Amino acid sequence: MAAKPIRLWLGTAVAIAFTLFVIVFGRATPREYPKRIPVRFWHRWQGDWEKQVKKIVDMYNRSQDRFEVVPVSLPGEGSDAKFILGVTGGDPPDLMSMGSGSVPNLAANGFLSDLGAMMTPPEKDQFFNHSYPAIRDIGMFRGKVYGMTIGADMMALYVNAQQLRDAGYDPDHFPKTLEEVEEMGMKLNQRDSKGNLTRLGFLLSDIGFVSHLFGGGFYVNEDGSLKLNTPENVRALESIVDYRKRIGLDNVIRFQAGLNDIEGAASWAFMHGDLSITYDGQWRVEELRKFKPDLDYRVYPVPPPKDGGVPLGGLVGGNYMVVPISARHKEGAWEFLKFWSGLDNPDRAATCYNVGGWLPYSPSVANSATFQRWLKNDKQFGAFLEILASPNCKAPPPIANLAFLNDLIAQAEDEAEQGSKSPKQALKELEQKFVKERDKRRALGYDE
Amino acid sequence: MTNSGGPRLSTANKVAVYAALIVLSIPALLPMLWMVSTSLKTNAQIFGKGELTLSSLIPMPINVKNYPDALQNMPFLLYLRNTLLLCVTTVIGSVASSAVVAYGFAKLNFPGRGAMFGVMIATMALPGQVTMIPVFNLFRSLGWYDTYLPLIVPSFAASAYYVFLLTQFFRTVPTEMSEAAKVDGANEWTIFSRLILPLSKPALATCALFQFIGAWNDFLGPLLYINDPAKYTLAYGLQQFVSHYGGFFAQLMAAATIFTLPIIVLFFFAQKTFIQGISTTGGK
Amino acid sequence: MARTRNHRAREYLVGYLFVSPWLIGFLAFTLWPFLQSIYLSFTRYNIVSPAKWVGGANYRMLLTEDPLFWHSAWVTIRFALVFVPLGIVIGVGLALLLNVEVKGMAIFRTIFYLPSIVPTVATSVLFIWILNPNIGLVNRMLELIGVKGPAWLKTAPWAAHSLVLMALWGVGGSMVIYLAGLKDIPQYLYEAATIDGANALRKLRHITLPMMTPVIFFNLIMGIIGAFQYFTQAYVMTPNGGPEQSTYFYSLYLYNRAWKYVDMGYASAMAWMLFLVIVITTALVFRTQRKWVHYGG
C-alpha cells in the first residue's frame, strides 16, 4: 500500500512538469507587421495550396505598407457555419474565398458587399467590359457585383501522348467529335486478368458541364422560365450513362474509387498513367509542371457530339472572393483583391495567377507580358484560354438557391448512372422537384 | 477491501477467454494498425497495387518522415497547450457539477424533480445545429466571442449526459446506507461527499475520461467561437489535413496517430480506477 | 406540525441547491436558445435579415410536400433499429468478457476502447480508404478467400451497411460504462449465489444482468438519441447523401437546409420534429423502466 502514494506523487509531479513545459513553450506566432491595419482573409486552401496562397499574401504585404493581410486557412467541414456565424456575429473576416456556387445565395441573403460600389470608373469599365463574360457573370447577382474571381476553374481533356501513340493514334491530331473520342477511349482501356480496369481510356462526368457540349445546360432565366428538363440535357445524360454501361458501371466505380481523391496534387492518377484521356481542371497544368515535367501530354477542349453539339462549350466555376457586408476593413480587403485579381495591374497579378495555375478574370491579364512568358512554359494552358473566350462557355444561373439546384443535378446524375431511373425520368423529376422548391420559396416569401 | 472482480476461472475457461479475446480484437485493432502502418509509408507504397501481404501491414522500409512533416504543418505545442487547458478545466467543471446535480436527482426529493429531470433529458434531444445561432448570439452579446469562455463556462453547469449516467449509479446505492448516516447526524452534503462520492469512483472516473476525450476531440466548438489562430486546438489542427484542396493522406494518418496516442496512454493508466472500484457491500 | 413543515421545506431547499448548477445553466444558456429556435421554426429566416412569420407553413410543407423529409427519416430510423439493439448486445457481451480477471486484461480493454477515441475525422478518412473497392483492406482480405467485395461506399445497400458497421466498431465507448456498472455489483451477491449452488450462467441471468439494467437503460436512451441524431460520419464520408441517397440521414438534410441553402426557419422546423420524435420515443422507454430496470437503492 506504500507504493500507491509514491506513484500518485510521481504521477502528479510529472503532470505538473509537463504542463509547465507546454505553457512555456507553446507560444503564439506574433503578427509580422503589427503596426498596420489588419485585413483578415479566410480561405479554404490546405496543405501545399496553403503555402501558395501564403506566397501571394506575402507578395501583397511587401508591396505596400498600409495593410497587413492575415490569412487563415479554414478546414472545409464547418466552414459554412463559421462564415455565416462570423458575418452575423459581428466579427466577420474582411475577405473570404468561396466556391462559386455559394455567391448568389449569400448575395441574395444580403451577406455581401457590393464590390461595384468600391470601383472607380476606369475600374468599372475594365471589369464590366473587358472580363471574360462567363467569369464576370458568376460573381454577379441582379446586376451588381458581389464576387470577383482570383482563380476561376475550367475543365478540358488531358491526353497522354505516349499512350495514344502506342495505340496507333496521333496525339497532335485530336478527334473533333465526342463519339470518336469515346471510341478511342474504349481502345485505350486496359484490364487485368480478373477483368478489373487497370487503365481508363476516357470518361466524362458532371452533367452540369457535359450538357453544354450538347447545346444544353441547366439554367433558370430571369423571367422564371426553366431550362432543366430539355432534350439536349436528356441526350447529354444518356451519353454519360450509356458510355458507363459500355465500360461496365461496376468497373468504373471501382476504378475511380481507387484513384485517390484524398491525396494531394502530387499523385494525380493522370501523372501515373492510369488515365489516358481525362477530364480535369486547368490547375493541373501547373501541377504537372511542378511534379511531372517530363510527361508528354496535350490539352484539348472536349469535342462536341457529332450532331446537335456546340464547340468550345463549358461551364466555369472556381474561387470567388467576397467581402462581407459587415467587414471592418473593407478598403484593405478591396486593395488586396485588386492586387490578386489584377483589376488595376494585370501584369503584376499574372504572377499570382501563375502561382496556382488559375484562370485570369480578363484577357488583359492573359495577354500581359508576365502571363505570356509563363504560358510559354505551360503551353497547354492555352487551350483553356481558348474555351474561356468562346461564347459557349457559360456561368451557372445566378439564382439564390443555386446550391439546391446543384444538389438536384448531382442526384439526378447519380440515379441515372446507378440505373435506378432512366435519364429521361431523372431529369423530369429534377424539374418537378425544383419547381416545387421554387413554389415553396415563393409561398414562404423568399423573393426570387 | 473486497474487489468486485469477475468470476475466477479454471484454466480451460481461461484459454477460451483468451481465444475469444484475440479473435474479437482483430476487427477492433486492424483499422488502427492500418492507420499507423499507413503513417509509416510513402505515397507510392500506399497507393501501389499488388497482393496483400504482410509487408502491406508492416512497410519495408519504414518511413518516419511523415511524422516530422505533420508536426511541421501545425504549431503542435501551441495547440497542445490550448487543448490541455480546455480539457482540464472542462473535466473539473463538468464532473464536479454533474455529480452534485446527479445526487440531487437521485437521492433527494423536491417538487418538480421528475419534470426537471425529464426536461434535462429532453435537452439532449434537440439537434445542436438549430440552437447554434441563438447560442452564438448569446455568447457574443456577453462579449465572450473569441475567448475560451463559451467552451468552459457551460461545463460548470452540468452536462445532461453525465448527470444521467451518475444518477443511474447513485440510485444503485442502497438507501439504508444514507439512512444510517442520517441517523448519525450527517447532512446531505456530508452524505454526498463522504459516502456516495467515494463509492462512485468508477462512474466518476468514466465521466472524467469521457469529458477529457470529448474536449480533446472537440473541433466544432473552437472553430465557431475562436478566430485567433493562436487559440486553436489540436482537433482543429488535425482537421487541416483533410481537405479537397490538397490533403495529405499519409500525414493525416501520422497526425491522427500523434493525436490519439496521449488518450491511449491516459486510458491505459486510468483503467486502474475502474478496476479498483470499491464495492458497495458496505465494508467500511 | 411546524417542525415537519419546516423540515420538509428545508429538504426541498437542499434538493434545489444540489440541482442549481444545472438549473442556472439551463435558464442561462439553454432555455432562451430553445425558445428562440421554436420561434424560428415558424418563420422564414435566412439569418441576416429579420425573421418573417409564416405560421405553420414550414411544418405543413415538411410533412406534405417534402419527400426528402420522409426519405431521410426512414434512413435514420432504419439505422437506429439496426444499430441500437446490436450495439447493446455487443457492448454488454464485450464488457462481460473483459470483466474476467486474467493477466493482460488491461491491454485488451484498451484495444476495444481504442476505436471510440480516435477522432472522427481520422476514422472517416481511414474507413473510406479501408472500404475502397479495389485496393482497400476489406476487399483485399475478401479476395484472399475468393469473395469479390462490393463497392462499399459507392453502392446502394452497402453504403448504409458500412456506416452501421463503422458505428458498431466504435461500441467500445459504451463498453466502458458497462464495465463500470459491472464493477459496482456487490461481491456478496455472487458469494451467496455460489453457496446456493448456482452456476455461471444462472449468476449471469439472475445477478449480473439485472444489476446492470441501470447502465443498460442509460445506454439504450443514449443510443436512441445518438442514432436519431447521427450526422458526422455521414457528412464526412457521403456528403452528397450517398449512392441513390441511401445514406442521406435526417441530420444531414437538416444541415444542408440550415447552412447550405441558408433556410434556417425550415431547418428549425425539421429540428423540432426530430425533437418530438426523440422525446416521445424516450418517454415511452422511460415508462417501461419499472418493468425491467432494477435499482439497488
Image: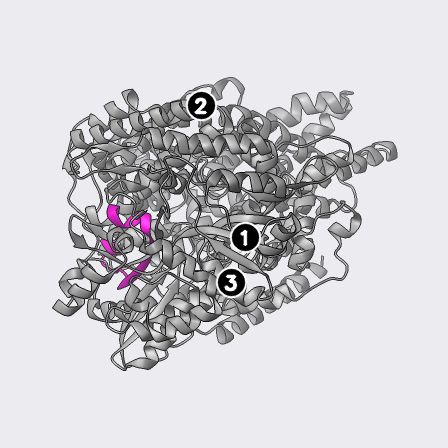
User: Is residue C280 shown above or below A125?
Assistant: above
Instruction: Where is residue C2? Give x, y as percent.
Output: 26, 32
SS class, disc 1: strand
User: Who comes first in sequence, dot 2 or dot 3?
Assistant: 3
Using residue B59 as the reference point, say whether residue C278 is left or right of it: left
SS class, disc 2: loop
- Circle number at residue A287: 3
Labels 3 & 1 near each other (Cβ < 8 A): no
Between B48 and C91, which is closer to the camera in this rendering?
Answer: B48
Q: CA distance from mark 2 to mark 3?
A: 38 Å
State the image quarter where residue C267 is shown: top left
Between C110 and A406, which is closer to the camera in this rendering?
Answer: A406
SS class, disc 3: helix
Label 2: chain?
A: A
Say how the picture is coloured.
Answer: one colour
Q: Are marks 2 and 3 on the same chain?
A: yes
Magenta-colored span = A87-105
- Circle number at residue A421: 2
Question: Residue drawn at (39%, 66%), measured in percent from left and top?
Answer: B229
* Amino acid at the residue labelled 2: Lys
Label 3: chain?
A: A
Instruction: Where is residue A176? Give x, y as percent.
Output: 46, 45
* Amino acid at the residue labelled 1: Val
Q: Quadrant of the N terminus of chain A?
A: bottom right
Q: Residues within 10 Å of mark 2 (few under 14, many from 20)?
A: some
- Circle number at residue A159: 1
